[in-house]
Amino acid sequence: MLARAIYKPLVSNEANMSEGSVNVESRTSSQDKRWTIMAALLGTSTAVMLFQGIEQEKNYSYEREIALTLIASTIPFQGIYFLIYTFLLENNGKLSEEMMSKLNFASALCQVIAYVSLFGVIILWYTMSKMVGIAFTISALIAMVLVRYAMNQSGESAITE
């Protein structure tokens, strides 16, 4: 006879949540937008490493090796970004200004290094086709500029409200 599992949500309603708990749905800061971008980069990096790594074993390519090396070298920084982000959320208001400054600098550094993974993806697209590589490079640059512009605009409007 199989035992029936009873489903219990971790948080059944907002009344049960403490004031200090993290409610992902209610947060809309620019940090959350950065978190989403970093999550997308980490997911992309992991998927590329998996599928291109399998292809690399079957059909070795020096260019693919360089691209995978770039991507692999950024994954730890993407993970560290999430650790810093979570630590800052859990200790909001409890850290000194100096510690906050150091953690924010480390977070920004991890973000910049994480963007290097896009160069690995660009190399992969170039090895497939120069036209695809050029199109991806141009669109990636435009997308990054647009995201940064939108984040700056939303940050400025939140301050003036």
Image: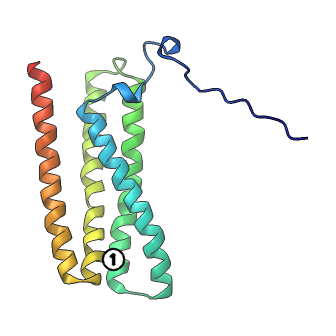
Where on the picture, by quarter, is residue 118? bottom left
The amino acid pointed to by label 1 is Ile
- Residue 65 image position (x, y, % from top left): 38, 79
- Residue 100 image position (x, y, % from top left): 29, 28
Task: Note whether 79 is above or below 45 in the view shown.
Answer: above
Task: Note whether 24 is above or below 45 in the view shown.
Answer: above
- Residue 138 image position (x, y, % from top left): 13, 67
Q: Could you tell me which secondary element the residue under label 1 belongs to?
A: helix
Crowding near pointer 1: few (<14 within 10 Å), some, many (20+)? some
Total residue callouts: 1
Display coloring: rainbow
Residue that mark 1 sits on:
66
Where on the picture, by quarter, is residue 106? top left
Where on the picture, by quarter, is residue 11? top right
Quarter occupied by the N terminus: top right
Q: Residue at x 28, y 83 (%)?
A: 127
Question: Most extreme residue toward the right, as rendered?
Answer: 1
Q: Residue at x 58, y 26 (%)?
A: 10
Task: Note whether 10 is above or below 75 in the view shown.
Answer: above
Is 32 left, or right, of 151 in this rendering?
A: right
Quarter occupied by the C terminus: top left
Is 15 left, or right, of 40 in this rendering?
A: right
